[in-house]
Amino acid sequence: MAPVTKRTQRRTDGLSKELIVRAAADLLDAGGESALTLRALVTRLSTGYGAIYHHVANKDDLLAAATDDIVAGVMTGVVVEGDPAEGLRAVALGLFDAIDAHPWVGAQLSREPWRPALLDVYESVGSLLDALGVPEGALFDAAGALVNYILGVAGQNTANTRHLAEGDADRSAFLGAVAARWSRLDPARYPFVHRAATHLREHDDREQFLSGIDIFLAGIATLR
Amino acid sequence: MAPVTKRTQRRTDGLSKELIVRAAADLLDAGGESALTLRALVTRLSTGYGAIYHHVANKDDLLAAATDDIVAGVMTGVVVEGDPAEGLRAVALGLFDAIDAHPWVGAQLSREPWRPALLDVYESVGSLLDALGVPEGALFDAAGALVNYILGVAGQNTANTRHLAEGDADRSAFLGAVAARWSRLDPARYPFVHRAATHLREHDDREQFLSGIDIFLAGIATLR
DNA sequence: ACCTGAACACCGTTCAAGT
DNA sequence: ACCTGAACACCGTTCAAGT
């Protein structure tokens, strides 16, 4: 009796870098950075290690490609017409929200800020600042600082989210614990932090990010 | 004949968390994040794994403690008297330089922004902004944004340094390669990046960081 | 060309056993 | 209390062998 179905099934359709990258992104979204292992990828795609290494140089390459996809998606979706300041806010918020939704993107962008995927980010931030009237001499520093701010803070924010990855009410519980620790501090030694404890509990990361952008834009306006 | 000297020598003095943390920092400084392995630590301190785990909870604990030491050193060394804006620049530059000298600190601070070691950073930034006349309603957002900016950008900068960790002339060679790639771009599609290529080659990270701080401070001045 | 999967050289962490 | 070091359960990556 010949076996009709082989139990260890092999994929019939061919593999591709695109397919592997998509699977990697799914693993990352579902379980965070530690969930992306070659072993997990091999089982999910029901192949062998060699098959993956045939399409992808190594794990870093895989992470970089997955990140490029997300960034590209943000930049094609963002509207930069009309008021330049509005355009800058749109780019910044687009990246913030994408990193918020895919925390692993933040970590990756901090590690590789020269990625080709960021070209479009530099381009739109630079030209929007230009449109805003920033003089030539200050333009490149300002653009660099602003992009660094966006990536840095969004990535920074990622760290917070990652810390409270599990439960639902965990976020407020975690912030509550930090706030409690802060309010227990000696008000003579830490007057500001002591006062800040109340604000910490109710602060919104996204709003704080935006108000940082606004401070930055107000500062840039003085360069005109 | 009794053996006079045992070849596998055992340390005669006791171990301590402080000793372990210092050794960890040395390994990190010398070889980057990947150089800190429990095995390397065990040989360097000529002990066993259990000895280390007796003083330290795990590797994360070790990294956090080493980071705390560096940050504490910065904050005790920084002068925050006189002009509040000067004080803010001093704090920012102090952290930038420390992260530049110990790139692993940047990565760690991005991962754990609620560390007790950062309390003094929040405190001095907050009180300096207060002294600068930032109104109560905007104070906490401004302080959060500024600290995020400092840590985010300094950590971001770490990533660049890490990429060109080896040789001497590597830095300019690497930037030159990126600049060359940028100037090869279609000037119609990437007008800004194309122009920026020249500036990239000669830009100074520290100066760009500082000009970002100044933009931020100029923006904060408008809140008054 | 594309894929398989055993094997290799590493990790961090544990734990029974020693002093 | 403090330390030892073999053992465990993982990693990413390679490579001879298959189709």
Image (spheres, coloured by chain):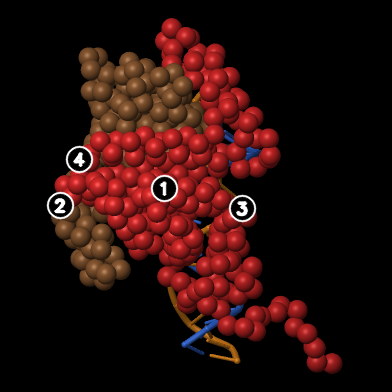
Chain colours: A brown, B red, C orange, D blue
- Residue that carries the numbered disc 4 in the rendered image: A207
- Which mark is nearer the camera, 3 or 2? 2
Q: Chain of mark 2?
A: A
Q: Is residue B148 visible?
A: no
Of marks 1 and 3, the one in the foreground: 1
SS class, disc 2: helix
Residue depicted at 23% across the width and 39% down the height: B223
Residue B33 coordinates in the image, percent (x, y): 53, 52
Discs 4, 3: same chain: no
Direction from residue B2 to residue A223 in the image, left or right: left
**Residue A38 falls in which quadrant of the image?**
top left
Q: CA distance from mark 4 to mark 1?
A: 28 Å
Q: Measure the alpha-carbon separation of dots 4 and 3.
A: 39 Å
Callout 1 secondary element: helix
The image shows residue B153 at horizontal and vertical percentages of: 42, 41
A41 relative to A161, above or below? above
Instruction: Tell me the residue that label 2 is attached to.
Output: A202
Picture layout, residue A146 above or below residue A39: above
User: Which numbered disc, 1 or 3, marks the residue that appears first in the sequence?
Assistant: 3
Q: Amino acid at mark 1?
A: Glu
- Labels 4 and 1 positioned on one and the same chain: no
* Three-letter residue code for mark 2: Glu
Image point (56%, 73%), residue name: B19
Q: Which residue appears at 46% of the width and 22% of the height? A: A137
Q: Earlier in the sequence, mark 4 or mark 2?
A: 2
Can residue B201 be seen from the camera position used here? yes
Mark 1 lies on residue:
B86
Q: Of the numbered discs in the image, which one, if any, rests on residue B31?
A: 3
Q: Provide the secondary structure element on which disc 4 rests.
A: helix
